[in-house]
Amino acid sequence: MTLFPTEQWLAQYGRRLDESDALDDVSAGWGVGFDGDIRMVIDDVPLAETTLGDLPPEVLAELPEDIRAGVEDVTLAQAPERFGEHIRPTLPEIVQDLLRQIEENVHDGAIHAHIGLREGSVTEVETLTDPDARDAGFLIHGSLTTWQGILDGRPAVSALLTNDLTVQGNQVRLLRYASMLGLLGEVAAEVETTHLFAEPGPSVTRNVVDAATRPGVTVGRSAERQVTRTLQDLSLL
């Protein structure tokens, strides 16, 4: 199992995407003649609200029990300073790496994951240490809670309909490739994932919308074909 949201999870996701035959089927032409790179922005990462004791058991499993009991109340926001350069080398590797990723990858409460995508090929994946250092053609914003739901099987279309996910980029292309965007969520749900942060339960409204949007990529492809025909009629493609 891979911890989300971490660099290791993003690497696994990139491999899954690159190996996906379904993605090849729905992404013909994506990124050809335009910037098809996608940035997943994971907002509202609760560092100040989450303690080391709240993390999955495997994160602290290698610490001696007495030391573990003494640090369980330290929040993730406090941890990088609490475990300075002299103490950190004595910690288990998984804890050292987590502290590094907190310091380098969380900016104003958000994690920015860049995915290079051209047709069915993933050209790169990177968790950005400087979100302003590079551009992407499409930005997908959602809270950590929303992304967790998608990894647990919530249809991405449902999250879009409820504005839990928002997408910035060329709207005509987004309509044309609607099924591809849905598939990005489906592939994410295939990654064997352990959530680093606790998950709240879904709302009644979300459950209703989720159920209504579960037909999946087949319906999405039909809608995509209809949108493409309409846009061609309007000379927009």
Image (cartoon, rainbow, N blue to C red):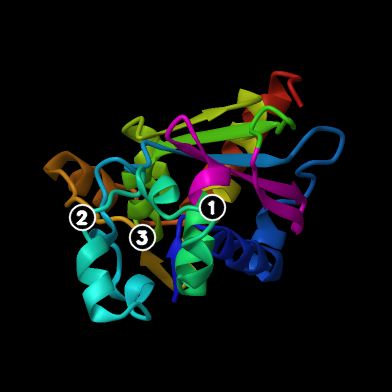
The percent position of residue 47, horizontal first and vertical second, equals: 34, 44
User: Does the magenta stretch mainly form a helix, a strand or a loop?
Assistant: strand
Location of mark 2 (residue): 73
Location of mark 3 (residue): 196
Left or right: 198 in relation to 203: right
Q: What residue type is labelled 1?
A: Gln
Left or right: 177 in relation to 92: right
Question: What SS does tag 3 mark?
Answer: loop
Q: What stretch is highlighted in magenta?
A: 102-129
Residue 167 badge: none
The percent position of residue 151, horizontal first and vertical second, equals: 40, 59
Location of mark 1 (residue): 101
C-alpha span from label 3 to label 2: 16 Å
Question: What SS does tag 1 mark?
Answer: helix
Question: What SS does tag 2 mark?
Answer: loop
C-alpha span from label 2 to label 1: 20 Å
Q: Residue at 74% across / 48% down in the picture?
A: 116
